[in-house]
Image (cartoon, coloured by chain):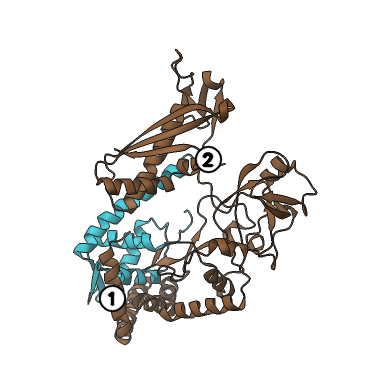
Chain colours: A brown, B cyan
Amino acid sequence: MKSLPAQLRALWMRILGVLRPARADADFHAELESHIAMHTDDFVRAGLTPVEARRQALIRLGGVEQTRQAHRERRVLPQVESIVRDLAYGARSLRKNPTITAIAVLSIGLGIGANATIFSMISRFVLRPPPVGDPSTLLSLHTTRTGEPCCNDFSLPMFNDVREQARSFSGVAAYYELLPASIGGAGEPQRIWGQAVSTNFFGVTRVPLILGRGFIDGEERQPKVVLGAGLWQRRFNGDKDIVGKSVILSGRTFTVVGVTSGLFHSVDQILYTGRTHTTGGRDGSTRSDDGRLELKLSPPGSQGSGTNPEQLFAAGYAACFHSALKVVARRARQDADGSTVTAEVGIGPINGGAGYGLEVALVVSLPGVERAVAEELVAKAHEVCPYSNATRGNIKVDLEVE
Amino acid sequence: MGDKKDVWQGTLALMVLKTLESMGPQHGYGLARRIEQTSGDLLQLNYGTLYPALLKLEQEGYVRSKWGISENNRRAKFYELTKAGQRQVSKAAAEWEETTEILARFLTPAEGA
């Protein structure tokens, strides 16, 4: 967002702000008074009595004291003492309570570092309301870094502090990003995705459950699991007596305590859903439900004029990767103008002919940057691009910088 | 009228810079009125939220302030864009356009599952 010098300058000004608080305070007080006076003038001209005019001006300002406080906080360094206090508190409660939750092990991001200042930035779920009790009351917490929203990777001690000390919320729950697991038991092992959450997650989000219950306090370290409705239907044929039964996830036995309603996948958002309809297989046609895509399909090497799934995959992957590349380049302040991505998708038999697999080669051209930088950007884009994330560990993907 | 939208910090900073760029030096009250007007009254901010934002911009060196006399003869603190501020307006505006463009791609197929 900003250049480093601006941030450093702001930091320096704030250090100075600590040194001469009285003068700055008086100056801002005068500025506010002048603001209120001007606004009052306008209201008077609009026909209000002077008293009512001043009252309205104060209301529109949002309170003199609140404004002065916000200004004061911005003027000086962020709450250094409160950070120290938080750290001490975190250390204390950790010592007192070594029962670190199962999530803790995963989510301890060694986060109380430089950028984990304080949890002030709150962003609403903006796009589609998540399938929870009352989306309008649900907020996601982020830390800020020099006033800019930053990360939501709270460490466990920090999460505990927020949970115990933040009075603005009726509850604070944590979840960890998607975790892969293989589900065993009856039938073929299958790769599924899950999420580790704090025990109060279902209480806080009020995610509806169709069977059983969510987690309860004290179950932090116990192998308990709540199944999504989709998995429950697919894998367990919608077994109504599933609660209390065991499932094996990545070789460990978990006890099912509940099943969520069909809507729930995660509180994270699906931003956009693309939908296409295909008829006739490799010798047919495919179209998207919004009519933007309409293509004929023909087998590769045949006389037909249509495209094929390999070309479509190549086009999709290249477009996805290119878009990810531009995002990471912009973040790194590198020039992605004139860049191109060429994708090759090969298909061939795997598992001794039992099925077919794909392999991908992406050739990236980034004429605006040095090779070493380009390689770094490509590696980063590979972490961002959804196609890369979907295929990682499954198929061979070669990256090449031209 | 639609909903009054909350203003979040980065956007507000950009609006302030842009307003100063097009209108020249302004006092805080004038800026607040102007931003509200420009947004077609879609946006109603607590005027008080403007001041921490202005302070931040000043700390970053994008604006500077000095006391002067308002059009109605009141003493008021005026803010103006610095050179760095002018550069920042074009940079931030470009970034903003890019962001909205990306978001628009997600949102325009007004088809949600």
**For residue A138, above or below residue A79:** above
Q: CA distance from mark 1 to mark 2?
A: 47 Å
- Look at mark 2 in the image and give the residue it sits on: A273
Q: Is residue A173 left or right of residue A27?
A: right
Instruction: Please tell me which of labels 1 and 2 falls first in the chain.
Output: 1
Q: Is residue A139 left or right of residue B87?
A: right
Work out whether residue A157 or residue A211 is closer to the camera in this orientation and state it.
A157
The chain identifier of the residue carrying mark 2 reads A
Disc 1 residue type? Met
Q: Which image quadrant for residue A314?
A: top left
Q: Residue drawn 25% across and 69% down? A: B79
What quarter of the picture does the C terminus of chain A occupy? top left
Picture coordinates of residue A279 (x, y %)? Answer: 56, 22
- Look at mark 1 in the image and give the residue it sits on: A13
Disc 2 residue type? Thr
Picture coordinates of residue B15 (x, y %)? Answer: 33, 60
Element marked by disc 1: helix
Picture coordinates of residue A136 (x, y %)? Answer: 57, 59
Q: Residue drawn 33% across and 85% down? A: A21
Q: Is residue A28 visible?
A: yes
What quarter of the picture does the N terminus of chain A occupy? bottom left
Element marked by disc 2: loop
Tags 1 and 2 on a common chain: yes
